[in-house]
Amino acid sequence: MTQSPDLELPVSSSSKTPAPSLTLEVTRTDVEAEGKKLATIDSFKSSKDMLIDNVFKWLSRHKSGASDPSAPKPIIIQCDKELEFNVVKRVLYTCSKAGFSDFSVLVVEE
């Protein structure tokens, strides 16, 4: 797993390594996936709607392209440690609405 250069991950004492899966990167300014900017934080953090439209669309495309779209697919979320919980909550909500319920938050091992 490659950490985004503009992302500082929180530290953890867990030694469990993540399995390959989809990855979202939530930096201090953007939500990205596969090197593409999906949304800026400013575009959704004060919205009344919890769903992040472009992130939902990207996730839905990946869910429908899976060999078994009904099977739970894990998603790893890399979040900057300084992000407001409101932003992280909206990303998790969007993942859930797109049909992803198996979340892992990537951290740096202490």
Image: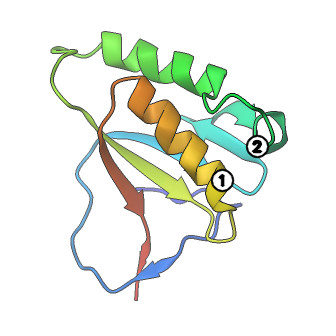
Residue 51 shown left or right of residue 94 in the figure = right
Mark 2 or mark 1, which is nearer the start of the sequence?
2
Q: Quadrant of residue 72?
A: top left
Can you say whether 103 is above or below 47 in the image? below
Per the image, label 2 sits on a secondary structure element best described as loop
Does residue 76 appear left or right of residue 11 in this picture?
A: left
Residue at 22% in and 51% down: 19
Q: Which label sits on residue 56?
A: none
Residue that appears at 78% across and 33% down: 47
Residue 86 - label:
1
Residue 41 or 7: which is nearer the viewer? Answer: 41
Q: Amino acid at mark 1?
A: Asn
Is 22 drawn above or below residue 105 in the view shown? Answer: above
Nearest the eye: 85 or 3: 85
- Residue 2 coordinates in the image, percent (x, y): 48, 56
Give the residue type that dot 2 points to. Lys
